[in-house]
Image: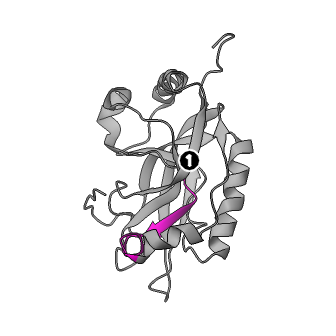
Amino acid sequence: MKKYKCQRVDSIRLLVLVPHRDSRLPLRAWSASLFAAGLPGAWSFPWVAPLAVLHRPLPSEQLTSLAHAMRQHVNQSGGKIIAGAPSCFAQVPAAIPANEQNESLSVFGPELNLALPDSFFSPAADALNCSLSPLVLGAALVQGNTLHSPDFPAALPTLPPPPLVSFRAAALANMSLHPLSAGGDQNGFSFEWKIGKLHWLPRMGIGE
């Protein structure tokens, strides 16, 4: 897993894919089961898929244009976005600073059957920090030292399996993620987030 060094920041800006609410509900329930199973960070990320890290939020017209382009890519993948087995990645600048130790974090959740070429992000190149791959529906944030522990892959089969989620309706949006103080617990971390206006992927036409 490739890692990027970054300076400690107060917040991070993301371009995210937001599934329809009906698809987010089972993911929310899964986060609850992951938390009950002892996976830290299960309530530290919303049930969306981060696509890229941004220098600044994208304007509405760019999000609308990207939503149309996203629909074309989804159509080429069968017209439906399907969530599969759990995956992790560490490309969100290695690190989203979680506490005073500046530990790295990765998004944990089911991987989507969707790959976006670099050209997809070309219209937003001036705002782009880095694109993310694979695309993962967030259900938790995993600390870097946990993710790279030899025990973590072995622990995956003991975690509750992800729900079978697929969806056609989805939107693109700006999102900001802000780390909160961990207080006296050096191993604890928490985040707050804000998701901007949703720009929905166009409906599939008749016969598509």
Figure quadrant of residue 166: top right
| Residue at numbered disc 1 | 84
Residue occupying image coordinates x 38% and y 43%: 56
Badge 1: how crowded within 10 Å, few (<14), some, or many (20+)? some
Residue occupying image coordinates x 51% and y 27%: 77
* Residue 124 image offset from top left, x and y in percent: 36, 31
Image: 205 above or below 106? above
Residue 196 visible in the current orientation: no
* Residue 52 image offset from top left, x and y in percent: 40, 43
Residue 126 visible in the current orientation: yes
* Residue 129 image offset from top left, x and y in percent: 31, 45
Task: Check disc 1 and report its element: helix, strand or loop.
Answer: strand
Q: Nearer the viewer, residue 96 or 203?
A: 203
Residue occupying image coordinates x 49% and y 49%: 136
Magenta residues?
Answer: 137-150
Q: Quadrant of the C terminus?
A: top right
Image: 79 above or below 135? above
Can residue 146 be found in the magenta stretch?
yes
Can residue 103 be found in the magenta stretch?
no
Image: 39 above or below 54? below
Which residue type does callout 1 highlight?
Gly
Image: 142 above or below 80? below
Which residue in the rendered view is the most extreme toward the left? Answer: 5
